[in-house]
Image: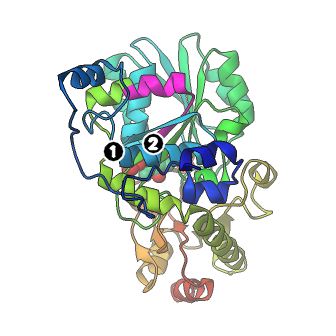
Amino acid sequence: MSLADEQADAAWSFDTLAVRAGQERSQFNEHSEALYLTSSFVFENAAQAAARFSGTEPGNVYARFSNPTVSTMQERLAALEGAETCIATATGMAAILATVMSLMKSGEHIVSSRSIFGATQQLFGTILPRFGVDTDFVDQGSVAAFRAAMRPTTRLVFIETPSNPLTEVFDIASLAQVAHEGGALLVVDNCFCSPALQRPLTLGADLVIHSATKYLDGQGRVLGGAVCGSKALTEEVFKFLRTAGPTLSPFNAWVILKGLETLSVRMKAQSANALELAQWLEAQADVTRVFYPGLASHPQHALAMRQQASGGAIVSFEVKGGREAAWRVVDHCRLLSITANLGDTKTTITHPASTTHGRISAEARTASGIGEGLLRIAVGLEAPADLKADLARGLG
Ligand SMILES: *Cc1c(COP(=O)(O)O)cnc(C)c1O
């Protein structure tokens, strides 16, 4: 039985698909997926070249259009998200840009959560308006606030859930309804949960965006991105990408593909570590508040537990004493890495007010709840006891 037959035949579970989906063995019958580090492909004859170029014969032509290693990664991620298709991109931002450029035109409108990745906010707020695409940023997570921002020209509703750094949770199913009632599409940046913890398409979202740079690679090695959804929508994204160029390199696709094989176990273990750390932080005298969807104290704990398999691996907390106290915690870390990156097996710590959110005005920061005493931790795979000891040094 061929590998393709096995896949069609078996209703494999998530963990199995993460290891097996999408592989096509070459004539050498390799066990680990081959890395096809080639930019172009050779044709049998002139007629085949013509047929490949015109699309009448399927097959690879040039790696800006397709490459077997990239295709394998796309199939595997599509299987994990429960998507018909997945299109890989050079970075997470390229996935967001390609989605907007392929599905929108001048005069149309985006309704976006304010709590989104900084570069996405910049793209929507400062670059797209030059091309006649305007965005209304919704400050509150309520479904009513999103509904009120809809216009007849709204084409996309865009959210990230849980949000960065305050782990605000957005109701995917209800927002899908709001988008669809207004003739728009719901796009969910699923970077923080990954499909191991949350599958937005099964809740009614139309497209899922990934920065594969984060949990999909999972070990901080390469940049990558993806758009997952129906064939009809992703085909438009693909047409833009193959022409405009920000496609995923085969090498990066191969690294991400191998990352997907351990995604499920990593997310389970990192979430368990995050929950333990969040509970410990809640008990510390100098910590005034902990933001983690897996804690009963989180205002949207019930919603989070409905749409996510666990709380995820991002924990934020507020310390007494503002910036000085927060920086003391950071500067006493010997184990936690001081970096804004997340999704790594190595735990990282960042002070959002002076780094990731440093370019936002102080008033806007305060309005969105990002205080001077706030710290964000992206929990990795180290022993929780060692993480606690590292944080305890700078607390109090
Ligand atoms: C990092 C990130 C992005 C952008 O991804 P890149 O791969 O850095 O381009 C988008 N969304 C979220 C939530 C992210 O964390």
User: Which residue is at the front of the view, 74 or 343?
Assistant: 74
User: Which residue is at the front of the view, 364 or 156?
Assistant: 156
> Farthest residue toward the left?
46
Q: Secondary structure at mark 1?
A: loop
Residue at horizontal 30 percent and vertical 48 percent from the top = 249
Query: Residue 132, percent across and down?
Result: 37, 16
| Amino acid residing under circle 1 | Leu
| Label 2, residues with CA under 10 Å away: few <14, some 14-19, many ≥20 | many
User: Can residue 37 be seen at all in this image of the molecule?
Assistant: yes
Tell me the quarter of the picture where residue 19 sits. Answer: bottom right
Q: Magenta span: helix, strand or loop, mainly?
A: helix
For label 2, the residue is 226
Residue at horizontal 51 percent and vertical 48 percent from the top = 22
Query: Residue 370, percent across and down?
Result: 54, 55
Image side of residue 351 versus residue 249, left or right: right
| Amino acid residing under circle 2 | Ala
